Image: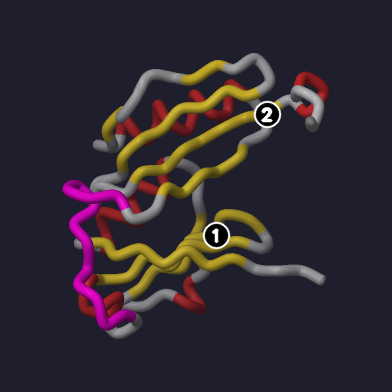
Amino acid sequence: MTTNTYINLPVADLDRTRRFFSALGFTFDDRFSDETALAMVISESCAAMLLTHDKFRQFTPRPVADARAATEVLTCLQLDSREAVDRMVEAALAEGGADIREPQDHGFMYGRAFQDPDGHIWEVIWMDPAQMPPKQ
């Protein structure tokens, strides 16, 4: 059984959002994108629906959080190498994202994080299964 994952995030400016994530190497499925939404492809089974605030409000009775003031979700992406982690974060920073913490190196896992232009935090990691500590 395949389980698909759709991450829904509110964004202020769809054009800026498309430019930002395109510079990080992401593509978009225009079949599910319009003037209120961008369907960003993360993998074959995962997408981020980047929605205008008005569109996002249609899915929740709660107020839309200001991601610069509060954190509701941390989205973590696992990449194929440490170098890929560094490349993605450096691309995010070059496109106006913010570095939010020092890199974390645990030997078997390396990670960094950035804030996108809307304040959402994206963690980017690489893990080496051969170096992982055994389960206890």
The residue where tag 1 is placed is 41
Tally of marks: 2
Residue located 33% across and 50% down the image: 19
N-terminal of the pair, mark 1 or mark 2, is: 1
Residue 76: image location, x then y, percent? 51, 44
Residue 102: image location, x then y, percent? 38, 19
Q: In the structure shown, which secondary structural element does the residue marked by tag 2 occupy? A: strand
In the rendered view, would you say 32 is above or below 86? Answer: below
Q: Is residue 62 magenta?
A: yes
- Name the residue nearer the viewer: 94 or 10: 10
Q: Measure the C-alpha gap from mark 1 to mark 2.
A: 22 Å
Quarter of the image that includes the C terminus: top right
- Name the residue nearer the viewer: 41 or 6: 6
Q: Is residue 64 magenta?
A: yes
For the magenta stretch, what is the residue range? Answer: 60-71
Residue located 40% across and 26% down the image: 90
Could you tell whether 86 is left or right of 12 in the image?
right
